[in-house]
Image (cartoon, rainbow, N blue to C red):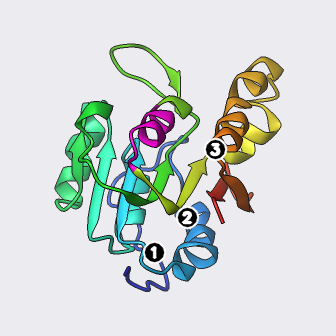
Amino acid sequence: MGMRVKVLKPCPWKWTRWSPSRIEMNPLFKRVLHGLKDCDSMLEFGCGMSTWYLNQYGFKSYTAVETYEPNMIRVKEVCPNVNIVDKWTSIPVMRYKCIFVDSKEGGGVTGRWVREKPLIYALDNNLVDDSAIVIVHDYKRIKQGVDGNLKWRKRLNGWITTMDKYGWKIKHEIMVGRGFGVYSKD
């Protein structure tokens, strides 16, 4: 079971406009993570500042999927217990109890994609425990449309369709900063 931190430690590197801030992460800890039982494994899509904050929870197993090398290097320096892989197919096979989808989209050598694709991969390959929670960062922007762009809203509504298709329902909406949506099956 995770640690009970009262206040998150500040991240040791510079915040960027896309990174979740401590102000955003604190409600997630207080409202969601502190109430979890038996949540000992984390699978994160994307890594960086969110990894620093989430790692303070004390997961026994933590895997992050990232392709941006500067983030991989920084996280390894400050969170040596986090296993970082650069391909979905390299995710260690186990049933993860907590999934964190960091931001609305990712990128790499293949270009940008909406991060529902790696989540679908994890769900289809039995990597997500039925009792897990799925936390989606950028939830506020997904819900309202990215910067008011309705074309993006249609594209990002894939989250809702994907979660419904797999039987996951929204349990918490945290609308601080860019927001978090927290899904579970029960």
Q: Is residue 74 above or below residue 154?
A: below
Mark sitting on residue 86:
none
Q: Residue at x 57, y 81 (%)?
A: 35
Mark sitting on residue 8:
1
Locate residue 149: give its quadrant.
Answer: top right
Circle 1 Cα neighbour tier, 10 Å, few/some/many (<14 / 14–19 / ≥20): some
| Residue 11 visible, this orientation | no
**Three-letter amino acid code of the residue under disc 1:** Leu
> Answer yes or no: do the residues labelled 3 and 1 have beta carbons within 8 Å?
no
Q: Is residue 63 above or below residue 104?
A: below
Q: Residue at x 62, y 43 (%)?
A: 166
Of labels 3 and 1, earlier in sequence is: 1
Q: Tell us which disc is closer to us: 3 or 1.
A: 3
Q: Secondary structure at mark 3?
A: loop
In this rendered view, identify the residue nearer to me: 170 or 185.
185
Residue beneath label 2, please?
25
Locate residue 4: give its quadrant.
Answer: bottom left
Circle 2 Cα neighbour tier, 10 Å, few/some/many (<14 / 14–19 / ≥20): many
- Give yes or no for residue 176 being in the magenta stretch: no
Q: Secondary structure at mark 2?
A: helix
Q: Residue at x 34, y 53 (%)?
A: 13
Circle 3 Cα neighbour tier, 10 Å, few/some/many (<14 / 14–19 / ≥20): many
Left or right, residue 183 beside residue 52: right
Disc 1 and disc 2: Cα gap in Å? 8 Å
Can you say which quadrant of the picture contains the C terminus? Answer: bottom right
Of labels 3 and 2, earlier in sequence is: 2
Residue beneath label 3, please?
138
Q: Which residues make up the magenta segment?
A: 118-127
Q: Position of residue 123 (x, y in %)?
A: 47, 42
Q: Residue at x 40, y 46 (%)?
A: 126
Disc 3 and disc 2: Cα gap in Å? 12 Å
